[in-house]
Structure formats: structure tokens, C-alpha cells
Image (tube, rainbow, N blue to C red):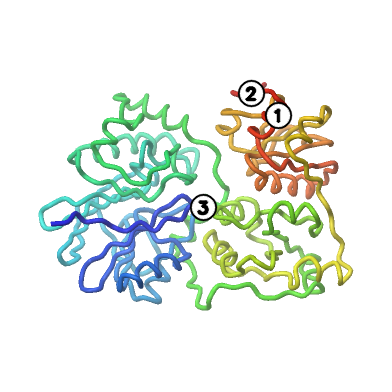
């Protein structure tokens, strides 16, 4: 008999896997689906499957759940932890309770830690354990972070995570482990590139599972937690209440330059999704640069104001449906629309523009008087940075306790995308003399003929 193999549908930008499980007779189960269901639906359609169950391991913080839409459109039954107090129709499972799927059975296993109500699900084929869906509990080489509910819950949930992981270690070594969070997810406390594993492999190699004492585990887990987007504190309540079902296909309404000016006068914000080079060459004053790429949704949720109308500027070759779907994933349900005609229409209609300087690594190597601001995560900065660069992470750039650096300032990351975002935020804050580095530390080292610095500079 072939082993059960759920199909992972991976969102590289959010670092998450939704699992599609064939239940037989053309039926399927989707576990931890996010709101952009296009890839999941395409996978199901290719296999001739209809999604009849939508299962959640926990109240998600990093994306709006797609279970409500699967229920409304496909007629799927929502299965969630019983203690999550969800305010919509669902079947709540408690520890040890089973869901009969026909030839398969899903058994709830209480594994709090990443969230207070977190469930893992054991999958049985008859009496044979086929694997375990671990959501935000056990991951490849790590575990889910426990500081997303609130500071006062971080340590208690870390202790709960310790007990949950050791409960999972009671399973046989050969048990496949199918986590939701993985590489690229800010819900994990550090993670490798692989997305699935086994109980035995984690028992042998997961650094957190080599720590026998609970206190040591808590300290190690907390040491792995970096910053996270502020919207992570907003979305659990959206998911608890039940997100709105987006009845019409995702898209962006056209906005004339005159209408954009009206919206800006009323407090709207502009997000420029074009590549960094195009943004630097000319953009609307005050626009936030978030280039369209897999992590667009993450940075939109992190940098944009959810209370302000959202105006998009995009390139002619960029898909408006992809932009709208990404926005919906992090709770921007109804963007005001997009500027019609790109920047050419804006300038032709008398709209003002701003430019941001762009330099390459050789140009930076020749600059001796500039303050270099590295907007990457702290761990990236510590692994290798331009000597003397200060680390102000992009998501917290304008929340620094100290004064913002004054020009000339060169903003950098690993390539240029986050650097463009950082430069746009500094310009919005009123700073001038900002330059974006087109490149990263390795390019600088090659151009300067000097090694990068490591560690944290004082």
C-alpha cells in the first residue's frame, strides 16, 4: 500500500504550506488554507478533487484564513480547535476527538505553544498512523514562536511549546511530519529550507529537542525570535470573527490622476509595486516602495496603514489580480484602486514626482561620508554587513528610539528591494539626500576589496 502523501501548496512569500489531502471518491481536505486560493483550487481541479473539509490548526497571525471562502463557495465544512471561540459555523475538535473521513481518520492532538488553542492532527489510515500535521508547533529544525499573542504570554506559551514538542516525540520515529510554517515564515523561531520531516529526524537533529531541561528550551526558543510584522497582532481577531468572503474576482479599480489626487488629499496612501529601479527614477511624492514579488503581501501588511485607502502604482507588465490577491491575504480587502496609465499619465496630467538616487557597490565603495543604513533583519546583518553600517530593520525603521540618520544616507539590504522600501519611508519622514544601494554586502566587498564585518557593531 502506497503511503499517504498530502500535497503541499506552498506560498513562498509567507513561508507557509497549505496541504491538500485526497480523501477518495473525488473529495479532498485542505489544511490551513490562506485567502488566496488560486493555487490550491488549481491543484484540486487538476486532480479532479472537490474540497469538502477546510481544517485549521490555529488562529493564524500571518494571513487571513481561506476557510470562510471554501465554506461559502465550495460548501466545505470548517474544522477548527474547539477552544478557539470562533464566531462562525464550524466543527470544533478537542484533544483526542476524531473526524471520520471515510478510509482515513483525523485525530486532534492538543499542542499549545505557538498559540493557546493550537491543535496538531494525527492522520490514520485504518489503524495505521500515516503522519501528523503539526501546524505551528513542531517544524523542520525548530518550533513555532510563542510571542505573537502578547508579551505576557511569551514565556508561558514557550513552556507549553516544550511540553507539546515532547508529546509529539511520543510518536514513532518513522512518522511523517507536515508543518504549516516553514522557511520564510515569521511565525517560526528560525527555520531551514526544508518543509517536511519525520519525528525521528527531529528527535535526532532539532536543536531545541536536544535540550532536556524546560528552562533551557525556553531560553533557546526565545533567543531565536526576531521581529515580526505588527499586523500579526491584528489578524487573529479577523480570523476568529471570520473574514469577509470576497465575492467578486480580485482586481484593482482604475483611478484617474485627478481621482488619485482627491484620495491623497483625503489621507490615502500610495504603494508603488514597480521594481526598485523604476521607483527610483520617478515616483509619486510620499509613495511607499514595495516591489511586487513573492513577499509583497508580507511587506504590505508590515509597512502600509490598514486604516488608510490604498492606491497602487504598478508597471504595465505587472498583474493587478496578483497585487489585489496579495493585499487580501493580509487584510487589505478593498484597495481604492490603481493609477491608470502608470507614471506617464500622472506626469502628463501635471502630477509632481520625486526621484531617489541609486548607486551600485562600486559607487558606495567610493563614498566616505555617507551613513550606511542596513534594513535587513538582525540575524542577516550579523552574518555579514558593510563595516560601520547601522542596522535599522525595515519593519521598525521609523520606530527607532534614537534620531534618524541625516544625509547623505545610503540604504541597503541584500539586493535592493527592501532598501527601496527603507528609502521611501525615510523620504516620507522628511529626510533628503537618500540613496538606494543596488546590491548587497557581497557586491560591496567585491568592489571595495575588503571583507564584510560580522556580529553586532556598537
Q: Position of residue 304 (x, y in %)?
A: 65, 55
Marker count (numbered): 3
Mark sitting on residue 351: none
Asked whether 312 or 56 is in front, the reply is 312
Instruction: Kindly report the distance in space between the C-alpha atoms of the residues bearing marks 2 and 1.
Output: 9 Å
Assign a secondary structure to mark 1: loop
Badge 3 crowding class, 10 Å Cα cut-off, few under 14, some 14 to 19, many 20 or more, is some
Q: Split into 4 quadrants, where in the image is the C terminus?
A: top right
Q: Which residue is mark 2?
A: 453
* First along the sequence among labels 2 and 3: 3
Asked whether 91 or 170 is in front, the reply is 170
Tell me whether the residue at label 2 lies in contact with that at label 1, contact meaning CB atoms closer than 8 angstroms. yes
Q: Which-is-in-front pick, marks 2 and 1?
A: 2
Q: Which-is-in-front pick, marks 2 and 3?
A: 2
Q: Position of residue 181 (x, y in %)?
A: 41, 48
Q: From what the image shows, is residue 158 above or below residue 317?
A: above
Amino acid at each position: 500500500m502506497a503511503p499517504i502523501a498530502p500535497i503541499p501548496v506552498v506560498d513562498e512569500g509567507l513561508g507557509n504550506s497549505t496541504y491538500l489531502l485526497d480523501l477518495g471518491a473525488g473529495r479532498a481536505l485542505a489544511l490551513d488554507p490562506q485567502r488566496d486560493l488560486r493555487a490550491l483550487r488549481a491543484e484540486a481541479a487538476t486532480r479532479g478533487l472537490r474540497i469538502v473539509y477546510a481544517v485549521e490548526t490555529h488562529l493564524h497571525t500571518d494571513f487571513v484564513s481561506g476557510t470562510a471562502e471554501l465554506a461559502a463557495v465550495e460548501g466545505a465544512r470548517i474544522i477548527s480547535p474547539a477552544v478557539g471561540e470562533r464566531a462562525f459555523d464550524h466543527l470544533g475538535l478537542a484533544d483526542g476527538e476524531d473526524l471520520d473521513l471515510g478510509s482515513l481518520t483525523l485525530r486532534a492532538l492538543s499542542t499549545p505553544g505557538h498559540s493557546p488553542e493550537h491543535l496538531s492532527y494525527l492522520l490514520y489510515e485504518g489503524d495505521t498512523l500515516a503522519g501528523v500535521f503539526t501546524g505551528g508547533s513542531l517544524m523542520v529544525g525548530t518550533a513555532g514562536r510563542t510571542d505573537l499573542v502578547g508579551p505576557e504570554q511569551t514565556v508561558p506559551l514557550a513552556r507549553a511549546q516544550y511540553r507539546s514538542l515532547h508529546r509529539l516525540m511520543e510518536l514513532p520515529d518513522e512518522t511523517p511530519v507536515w508543518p504549516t510554517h516553514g522557511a520564510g515564515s515569521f511565525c517560526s523561531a528560525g527555520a531551514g529550507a526544508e518543509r517536511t520531516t519525520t519525528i525521528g529526524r527531529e528527535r535526532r537533529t532539532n536543536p531545541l529537542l536536544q535540550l532536556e531541561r524546560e528552562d533551557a528550551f525556553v531560553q533557546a526558543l526565545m533567543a531565536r525570535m526576531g521581529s515580526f510584522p505588527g499586523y500579526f497582532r491584528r489578524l487573529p481577531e479577523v480570523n476568529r470573527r471570520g473574514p469577509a468572503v470576497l465575492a467578486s474576482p480580485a482586481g484593482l479599480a482604475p483611478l484617474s490622476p485627478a481621482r488619485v489626487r482627491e484620495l491623497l488629499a483625503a489621507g490615502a496612501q500610495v504603494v508603488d509595486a514597480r521594481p526598485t529601479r523604476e521607483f527610483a527614477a520617478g515616483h509619486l511624492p510620499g509613495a511607499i516602495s514595495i516591489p511586487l514579488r513573492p513577499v509583497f503581501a508580507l511587506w504590505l501588511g508590515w509597512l502600509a496603514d490598514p486604516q488608510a485607502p490604498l492606491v497602487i502604482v504598478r508597471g504595465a507588465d505587472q498583474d493587478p489580480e496578483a497585487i489585489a490577491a496579495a493585499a487580501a491575504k493580509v487584510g487589505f480587502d478593498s484597495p481604492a484602486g490603481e493609477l491608470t496609465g502608470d507614471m506617464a499619465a500622472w506626469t502628463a496630467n501635471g502630477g509632481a514626482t520625486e526621484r531617489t538616487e541609486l548607486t551600485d557597490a562600486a559607487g558606495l565603495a567610493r563614498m566616505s561620508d555617507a551613513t550606511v543604513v542596513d534594513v535587513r533583519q538582525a540575524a542577516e546583518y550579523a552574518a555579514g554587513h558593510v563595516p560601520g553600517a547601522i542596522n535599522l530593520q525595515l519593519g521598525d525603521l521609523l520606530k527607532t528610539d534614537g534620531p534618524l540618520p541625516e544625509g547623505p544616507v545610503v540604504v541597503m539590504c541584500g539586493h535592493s528591494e527592501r532598501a527601496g522600501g527603507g528609502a521611501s519611508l525615510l523620504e516620507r519622514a522628511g529626510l533628503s539626500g537618500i540613496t538606494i544601494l543596488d546590491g548587497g554586502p557581497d557586491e560591496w566587498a567585491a568592489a571595495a576589496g575588503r571583507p564584510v564585518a560580522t556580529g553586532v557593531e556598537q
